[in-house]
Image (cartoon, grey):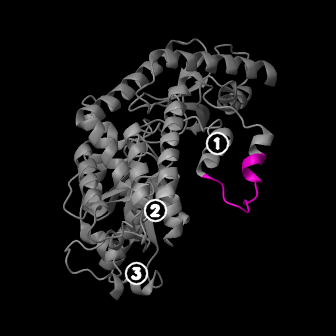
Amino acid sequence: MLESAVQDSFREAAAQAAELVADYLADLPDRPVWQPMPEEARAALADQPLPAAGLALPELLAAAERTVLPYPMGNGHPRFFGWVNAAPAPAGILGSFLASAMNPSSAGGDHADIHLERTVVRWIAELVGFPHPPGAGLLTSGASMATIVALGAARRRAAERAGHDVRADGLSGLPPLVGYATGETHSCVTKAVELLGIGSRNLRTLPTGPDGRFDPAALRAAVAEDRAAGRLPCFAAASAGTVNAGTVDPLAEIADVCAELGLWLHVDGAYGAFGALDPELGERYRGLERADSLALDPHKWLSVPVDCGCLLVRDPEQLRGTFSLVPPYLRDDSDPLGWFSEYGIEQTRPFRSLKVWATLAHAGRDGLRERITTCTRLARRLGELVAEAPDLELLAPVETSIAAYRFAPADPAVPADLLDKVNHALPLRVQQRGRAFVTGTVLRGREASRACLLNAATTEEDLRVLVEETLAAGRELLAELA
């Protein structure tokens, strides 16, 4: 228990922190989206010594206000369109604060966070229409961790079907396990197969169709080829919204092939799966409910504060059979579902569920749907503005809330290699100008900018600013690099 003087000091500092956070959030729209940090500001953070005597709470707040808050990543601003980073929901900020005060380990036991996590995982499954038997999911640090956990379960199932106990014997003696993906599959799948000992050479990159989607026929042919060569097909990784263009793979058709051939179907829905809440997009997600595993990131489109990913699976015993290891001091016979630590890698787990609960409960299903549909509508409008601009080219149809495009003046005298140099440098130039923030990518071999809309506070005027800044930066770079 805190002493009275310490309680009073904390109460006063907490009130000051609340004012500081409220002012920071209120001021964001009137500030530059992002600006490079001055060298002295970097040094003040990176090179500071550990103080010999502790700082009082008011001093800590003053230091954070002076050296941290002025230099954000930019993702709270309505004209931040970079990567897939959301503005934090105010309710989630409050939930994070309360969870930090309790500070439990959410590995298991009979306390509030365990039961709350089961509820929010069920809510997330309901939002995207994924079947959810009790125990069939857990919160993770993000979709990268969710993917490692999911493919770990896929690896064990494939080995078990081949008569091999991968938990006891490792991969030795098994034929090479093979996974299937496309060039648009998120890099976390590659990272997972490397860490799980499958190896990136055994992750086959299949050709996509002309629309950039996973081709079920290519999957069927590759599995037949690998089985004929004595390899062991394990899983296919499809996307419910790629990071480059927000494209949704033909999930139902891929599910048909996986069911027929006995493959584990993993769907990366980290960013895009919540697009299923938009009634206009629902048909694109048909088949999502048939996946063996689905990775999602509430800290993306739902605006839950980082970190918070989620893994959903159809069969909870696939997770428990892969990860359950219960030493005597953790045995708990009172709960038939066991501990969350039996379903994944983490033992000590943070109290993530309170910020998820706060964010989702505050918005409600209707509010979440409105947030998603606002972003998809704005993204389609951005696609229209890009298509209308004489010197911009839209590179893919806008399916969810990502628009991929490039600077492409109509002048035939501009060589292609110069345009690639301009488009490679363009996102950083836009960022440095401070009025908008986009990131770059390579889409089907072409340098591009991609704008991801996750902030329902964004307006059409913000989109017009982005187009203006893209054109201005492109013309500057064309003159400089020519």
Whole-percent x, y for residue 69 in the image? 61, 38
Whole-percent x, y for residue 322 in the image? 35, 75
**Chain-order first, disc 2 or disc 3:** 2
Residue 140, image quadrant: bottom left
Q: Residue at x 51, y 37 (%)?
A: 21
Magenta residue check for 333: no
Task: Name the residue tied to disc 2.
Answer: 2
Looking at the figure, which quarter contains the C terminus? top right
Q: CA distance from mark 3 to mark 1?
A: 53 Å
Q: Residue at x 53, y 15 (%)?
A: 464
Q: Nearer the viewer, mark 2 or mark 3?
A: 2
Q: Nearer the viewer, residue 164 or 368?
A: 368
Q: CA distance from mark 1 to mark 2?
A: 23 Å
**Chain-order first, disc 3 or disc 1:** 1
Q: Nearer the viewer, mark 1 or mark 2?
A: 2
Residue 443, image quadrant: top right
Label 3–label 1 contact, CB within 8 A: no
At label 3, which amino acid type do we have? Val
Which region is colored magenta? 43-56
Relative vertical location of residue 425 with respect to residue 354 in this rendering, above or below? above
Task: Name the residue tied to disc 1.
Answer: 62
Looking at the figure, which quarter contains the N terminus? bottom left
Q: Main SS of the magenta segment? A: loop
Q: Secondary structure at mark 3?
A: helix
Q: Residue at x 31, y 60 (%)?
A: 113
**Chain-order first, disc 1 or disc 2:** 2
